[in-house]
Image: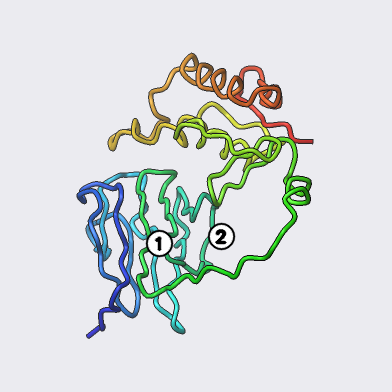
Amino acid sequence: MKRVTEGVFLRIDKGEPHREKELVPLQEGELLLGRIGRENAPDVTFTSPYISRRHAAIRFENGQFTITDLASKHGVQVNGYEIEQNRPYILKNSDKVNLAKGVVLLTFVNNNEIELEPTLEFTNPLLKMQAEPQGLVVYPERREILIDGCPLLLSGKHTELLIMLYLKRNQAVSYDEIKVKIWPERITDDSQEAPDVGKDEINALIYRLRKKLGRHGERIITVPRYGYMLDLE
């Protein structure tokens, strides 16, 4: 029998049919995440058709927990980054796990990890100011946006949109990609199509984001009849 690893959980922040913030204790061995089928019964099941029957696995090996994308159709992201299929990714406390572009949202909770704050160094404030990155800087893993070294506070959808464009910077991003990433709550279980979001709604979100970015807003370029691109060259 598998021994429960004390203080380590998978928190389900979003994902039918589970209630919000439901905690799943993690055990030694493997925990399979997926959609239930006639010959398939994952350890943690979800009902959305966008979740593959064998979507991902969380394993405890060599004293650490990992998550592996089991060649799912719609992918696995950790802290906003798409992980490589069939390759274990080490999980750390508070890591955000995203299945199928936001259809399922999970948080890895490891109460055994103790983060110790480093000893502070004396610094010259003037040198620190000079070292701050200039221009538009995006840190996807921290969901942090800086303009000329100053934090820019954005709403959830504005942040998601900018991070999405940044991760695919200098590449055209289609309207359908934006719909799935920014409006996952509108994906219906019985539809394989992109969410019902009009171009006017996307254009309005882009317009507001450009305004918030000030002079850097012009870096978001319209790609006619396709979508948008963040030009950082």
Binning the other alpha carbons within 10 Å of mark 2 as few (below 14), some (14 to 19) or many (20 upward) gives some
Left or right for 171, reference 89:
right
Which element carries disc 1, helix, strand or loop?
Answer: strand
187 or 53: which is nearer to us? 187
Left or right for 85, reference 44:
right
39 or 171: which is nearer to us? 171
Residue 173 is labelled as: none
Residue under the image location 66 percent in, 26 percent down: 220
Label 2 to label 1, Cα distance in Å?
12 Å
Residue 56 is labelled as: 1
Amino acid residing under circle 1: Ala
Q: Quadrant of the C terminus?
A: top right
Left or right for 213, reference 34:
right
- Splitting the image into 4 quarters, where does residue 28 fall? bottom left
Binning the other alpha carbons within 10 Å of mark 1 as few (below 14), some (14 to 19) or many (20 upward) gives many
**Sequence-earlier tag: 2 or 1:** 1
Q: What is the x, y in percent for residue 186?
A: 34, 30
* Residue under label 2: 84
Amino acid residing under circle 2: Glu
Residue under the image location 67 percent in, 31 percent down: 230
Q: What is the x, y in percent for residue 148?
A: 71, 36
Q: What is the x, y in percent for residue 205?
A: 50, 21
33 or 77: which is nearer to us? 77
Residue under the image location 56 percent in, 60 percent down: 84
Up the image or down, 6 lies above or below 123; here it is: below
Which element carries disc 2, helix, strand or loop?
Answer: loop
